[in-house]
Image (cartoon, rainbow, N blue to C red):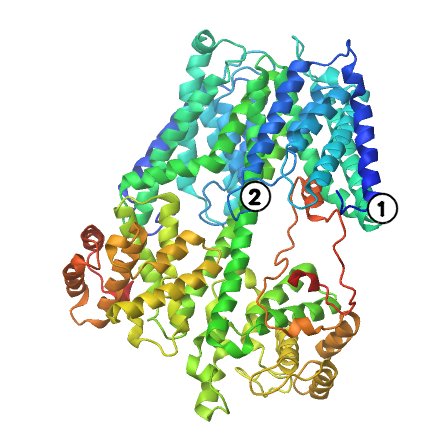
Amino acid sequence: MRAPYGSGPLAPAVLAVRGAALLLALVALAHTSVRGLAEPGLALVFGLLVAAGELVRRGAAAGEREPAPLAAAGALAYALLGDSAGRPTTHGSLQVIAVVVVAQALAAVPRRACGRRTDADRAARRTLTVGFAAVCFQPLYASGQAERWFGDGPWFPLFPLTVLALTALCDAVPAALLARSAALAGGPGALPPYGSLLVDEVRALAGTGVAIGATGVVTALGVAVAGPWAPAVLCGPLLLTQVSARRYTAVRTTCGQTMASLARATEIAGYTPPGHARRVAALATAVGRELGLTGPRLTVLEHAALMHDIGQLSLLDPVADGATARLPAAEQRRIALLGGAVVRRTGAGPEVAAVVEQQADPYREQPLAARIVRTVNAYDDLCGESVGGPLRALEQLRLGTGHDHQPQVVEALGRVLARGGLTPAGAG
Amino acid sequence: MSGTPAAARACILAAVLCAIWCTLPAYTPDAPVPWGTAVLLAALGLGCQAAGRRSPPGGPGPVAAGAFLPVLLTAAFLLPPAAAALVAASGSLAGRVEQPPYAARRIWRAAQLALTCAAASWAYATLGGPGTLGGGGAAPDFPRALLPACAAALAFSLVLTALDGLVLAAAERRPVHRSVYALLPLALGPHLVHALAGLMTAVLWRSPYGPLSALLVLLPMYLSRWVFAQYHREQAAHRATIRALVHAVDIKDTYTRGHSERVGRASVLIARELGMDDRRVEGLRFAGILHDIGKLGVPTRVLRKDGPLTPEERRIMELHPEYGHEIVRGIGFLDEARDAILHHHERLDGSGYPYGLSGSRIPEFARVVAVADAFDAMTSTRSYRRARPVPAALAELKRCAGSQFDPRMVGALDRALGRHGWSEADTAVTADEPREPYVSREPYGAAAGLRQDAPLIPRARSAAPLSGPSRDRRR
């Protein structure tokens, strides 16, 4: 989710998202300052909740999907707030946006003072998301339409839940836009299709997103019953969720680093050229996206690509340049099986081991991930050794489509490479 | 239940009788029990347990087993003690049990949670909690509602840990007060948070929005538990990956099989003796396990060569600390252990490699691992020579202390071995996992989680006192 920040021109998608958020914020602030705050006490409580939530994000790892769940839940709760302690409220959707924007700005001041970057994209996304939820909820609530549809009894929670579901879908759209422009800035050859990113964003909502949304709705309902005490009581459980999520993220990162180290071991041992595993993993992931893989299947592919050469460690002497693509098929298969045996011992999971084991089989017997690993690995090997460079390597792969390489995978690889401009393998 | 000691059986029987006595008031015909609420809550508890039982093959289960505490605390707030005990017992009877004896553990847990819930509910009612929840047209009385809820959480923690202490005392002869001191601080914080969630659930349950909205409070709590279980799974995956790194060295260098783990354990012995904190002890375990990882970079021919190395081969061999440092460079959590990998062949007088550091300029971790490495190299059998006995190896280490090794580390190893011993089994060919690479502290649900780890029945203890502190893991 990192945007090219302060360096170079901004991508149009980033500009559009930020511009829309800025416009919305300005309108909301102007409207609120003219009309004055309705229910200042509640505005203060929710403003504090959002600001505090932004501040306790301290310690969040870079790239975490939602580093401040407390702030997100607080902002959603204010947007979905109907009654307070049994009495109706009159703050409109624009006041919700104004309060959230001011709270975020206030929380950004100490972060800035510590010399840390403010995340403009995330703030813009939150403003748009909360704005959407508030605009859906508040007018229907104020006009009494919601009560006519859902009643004021046990069915009323369905109304904020419906708005929440719509908001989640709507939030995924700018998130995928921003992710796409970040990938664009991240380098050529890696530009994933929009649809696959959107699926990823919606899938990512399943864990923490549900917890945040449910807490937002519950806080709103809690205020409706118990007044401003409810947010304070519900802070504890949500912080617990945040702690769990953060520990999980931390150990995931560590596990990924260890796997990358294991993958690099073959390079240091001189079995494969420097950077080979990393290049194959990056290119294989791009090809996988191109072929429509998402979520866990993409992760399996990435890990398998990282570790595909592990089996070479058991060879007495290194293969020249580590280029297994030139070895006899039986030898290739033996190395693949040895690699699978090592990977089975890692925490990468049996799926990854299976892909590593089958990477040297003819493509008709392989799962898709193994086909991709095989083709991309061959491409990287051929690029490294041939004088002809990438074009020649692709040509050779096309010649092998009868038995070794699946034509669709080779074509997808060609498309990925064409988008990034044909870079020589060494430059990756 | 045949394997259960008599004292533990008596303890379980007493708890069951107490629990049944607690639920008696609910059976009287005019008891003020809201049966609808009780049945719904019991179904909810059963549902959570059932989800916890469904575990994927190989994994530790999607959600840590054990009762879902917020539901129990909600029951304690909404129901009279007798009914709360019934809800707790019905849920835990269906729950998953990790270790045998299954029947005894399940019955014990049901009785324990029934008693705990009844106590929490009683404390809540005594302080006038039910009146502050609102409902039936009245608004909840908010700052005042917090006090009974916190008191109930306190009662919950106290009774739960006290009962844990009792059964541990009966089954393992561990003093009750020691168990309670160990468990209570870990349990109190999470139980308070669960009580707050339970309070909000109860308030919404009584409100016009009804049980459906109350379920929404439990959803984030349940997800948080799910995330925590994922965390444990990922942690296991990480341990396995570290083991795979070590295994990759074993593939290349068949002489030193098992050496890495033993150096890890010897390093831990020294670290404990020096009084290092838990985090650094774990760091040293990893440093010891991974110290030779750089041998991956040394050609297999050189590693497996029988007979003396040529100067050229020796030079290549001496590159392994730098290769090792390069391999683990990207692993953030290793921290100090990376220095140990780079410098474990430095000598105190400056004649070592790769940098020829001397004295206190050699990182502390590296000085520990150097001693552990030399000790295990001497006491294990290699293809070219036989193992030396432990006293001879220690004498050799002492002889080289000051010139090659840090005397402080040698002294610590000497004392640690005097206390714990270094058994024959430890020098056998092994490649097992470190027992607890992390000190895993559950951030919540502590007592429920700890209770499953703590063995109800004492394991058959090996009589040999010379086994190290981590000896039993190879059984």
Front in this rendered view, residue B442 or B379: B379
Q: Quadrant of residue B442?
A: top right
* Label 1: few (<14), some (14–19) or many (≥20) C-alpha neighbours in 10 Å: some
Residue lying at 54% horizontally and 22% vertically, measured from the top left: A220
Give the structural element (helix, strand or loop) at label 2: helix
Percent x, y of residue A68 = 51, 39
Circles 1 and 2: CB atoms closer than 8 Å: no
Does residue A237 lie above or below B141 as drawn?
Answer: below
Q: Does any portion of residue A66 appear in the rendered image? A: yes
Give the structural element (helix, strand or loop) at label 1: helix
Q: Earlier in the sequence, mark 1 or mark 2?
A: 1
* Label 2: few (<14), some (14–19) or many (≥20) C-alpha neighbours in 10 Å: many
| Res B229 label | 2
Tell me the distance, in whole angstroms, between the alpha carbons under discs 1 and 2. 30 Å
Front in this rendered view, residue B25 or A297: B25
Q: Is the N terminus of chain A in the top left, top right, bottom left or bottom right quadrant?
A: top left
Percent x, y of residue B143 = 71, 23
Q: Chain of mark 1?
A: B
Residue lying at 23% horizontally and 65% vertically, measured from the top left: A424
Residue bearing mark 1:
B177
Front in this rendered view, residue B412 or B355: B412
Amino acid on which the number 1 mark rests in the picture: His
Q: Name the residue at the front extreme.
A: B2
Percent x, y of residue B222 = 57, 33
The reply, left or right, for residue B104 in relation to residue A16 is right
Amino acid on which the number 2 mark rests in the picture: Ala
Q: Quadrant of residue B341?
A: bottom right
Does residue B409 lie above or below A277 as drawn?
Answer: below
Residue lying at 43% horizontally and 79% vertically, measured from the top left: B300
Does residue B379 lie above or below A427 as drawn?
Answer: below
Q: Chain of mark 2?
A: B
Does residue A108 lie above or below B45 as drawn?
Answer: below
